[in-house]
Amino acid sequence: MNAPPFADWALVFLQGLYRAQLALARVLHMLGLTGDADGQAAWPWAHRIALETLRIDAGLTRQLAFALAATACAVVLACVALVSRKGRFASAIAALAVAWFAPWPPSSLWLSPAVPTSFQRDPAPFSVSNVVRGAHLYTQHCAACHGADGRGEGPLAATLAHWPPTFAGALLARRLDGELFWRVRHGTRDEHGVSTMPGFAATLGPQDTWAVLDYLKALSAGSGARAEGAWPVPVPLPTLDVRCGDAAPQSLEHWREGQRVRIVALAPGVAAPPEDPRWQTLLVTARGASMPPATGTRAANCVASTPDAWLAFATIAGLAPDALGGTQLLADRRGWLRARALPGSAGWSDADLLCRSDAAARPAAASATGDPLTALLLRVDTEPVRDVQAGLPH
Ligand code: HEC
């Protein structure tokens, strides 16, 4: 993210505003005061706090925080006026004065239009099956305008009044997921109300729409890696089933038990690498390829058994499926993908780190040990990344 420096307290303040709106929507829904939108609590108002604008305007954020604090102070003084006998008059005057002078910025600056799904998130986890399902839907319905690589240069793009945006940057992370969802289902309009993108509510149900957005995130990562050599925003390791030897498949989360995971795309006929105590190794094979015989007792033997995991990882790595063999990816203990080693690379290095935290560009902690992989792993552990919504880490 290329956001300007922003005070820590201001970031916490914005995260608080996000959570407060989320909590408000849920409470109103629980009390039966608001209805559902596509199966989840609906946001009942036409506006919400413009978190993404505040995130890039430190001055406005400060002013809003100050106005809120002053208003809270006025409320406290008003309560004091109600309950106390002695200072009633003085407190009431003070409450009015503070409320009157609270420096609220114009609401057009810190409110933005909202939709009923603004604060919704995908109820299903980011998974290989959703990414693959989304990939098929994207090819069918979206690629003509947005382009197969998501950079907005599909065959129809030049015929449109508005050029489709590129997904290779941080665009998706600057939005709320629930608003992307709404735009895909109901289309977009320009400032004159002229339709710029058709809506797909008639063709894509809620689950399909979330699946397309999952694929867009994977595509955005891969296209960003190709264009800039880095993932524009953190991508989670997609959930899938893992089969170790002859045992029954189990879910990725259960299998990895909070460990780092190295994903190895095994080219046909290549032997599995040895297991390593620093991570769990997950082998991914192309569809239909059989596992090569284990070459030693310590060879890794856990394979992604969900179909098309190869395709999902190729998309995220930014490589054509044919070129994925020999690629390795590394996921941290929290389940975020962090680094990629291309086929034929001699070993891991700092340059393989495709996902850095906001506190990037710190000198690598352990470069002095001389082992670049250990340095990379330490860096990944000490600089955790977080999910991004409306430009804010969560
Ligand atoms: C007819 C061409 C066309 C098709 C088909 C199309 N889009 Fe778009 N899309 C656009 C244009 C043009 C924009 C830019 C709209 C704007 O900025 O007003 C856009 C914008 C978007 C955005 C960004 C919205 C935002 O918040 O800025 C997303 C996400 C998106 N499209 C997803 C999709 C998905 C998913 C599909 C397929 C289900 C799809 N689009 C199909 C033309 C298209």
Image (cartoon, rainbow, N blue to C red):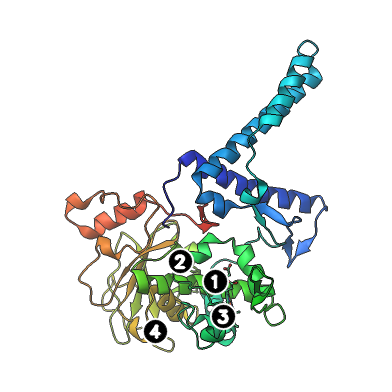
What residue did someone put label 1 on? Answer: 214
Where in the figure is residue 98, as x and y percent of width and height? 68, 27
Q: Residue at x 61, y 52 (%)?
A: 50
Q: Reading the chain from its start, which is encountered first: label 3 or label 2?
A: 3
Q: Amino acid at mark 2?
A: Leu
Q: Are marks 4 and 1 in contact (CB under 8 Å)?
A: no
Query: Which numbered disc, 4 or 3, marks the residue that appears first in the sequence?
Result: 3
In this rendering, would 210 be left or right of 363?
A: right
Q: Do we see residue 123 in this rendering? A: no
Depth-wise, is mark 1 or mark 2 nearer the camera?
Answer: 1
Return the residue at label 2.
Answer: 237
Chain-order first, disc 3 or disc 1: 3
- In the displayed image of the protein, which residue is found farthest to the top? 86
- SS under mark 1: helix
Task: Give the Cα separation between the discs numbered 3 and 2.
Answer: 17 Å
Image x and y of residue 369, in percent: 18, 51
Q: Earlier in the sequence, mark 1 or mark 2?
A: 1
Which label's residue is closer to the chain start, 4 or 1?
Answer: 1
Residue 328 image offset from top left, x and y in percent = 32, 72
Name the residue beneath numbered marker 4.
Answer: 321
Image quarter of residue 188 = bottom right
Left/right placement of residue 59 relative to residue 230 reads right
| Residue 281 in which image quadrant | bottom left
Q: Compared with residue 229, is residue 27 higher up or lower down, i.e. above or below?
A: above
Q: Residues within 10 Å of mark 1 (few under 14, many from 20)?
A: many
Residue designated by label 3: 133
- Label 1 vs label 2: CA separation? 12 Å
Residue closer to the observer: 129 or 191: 191
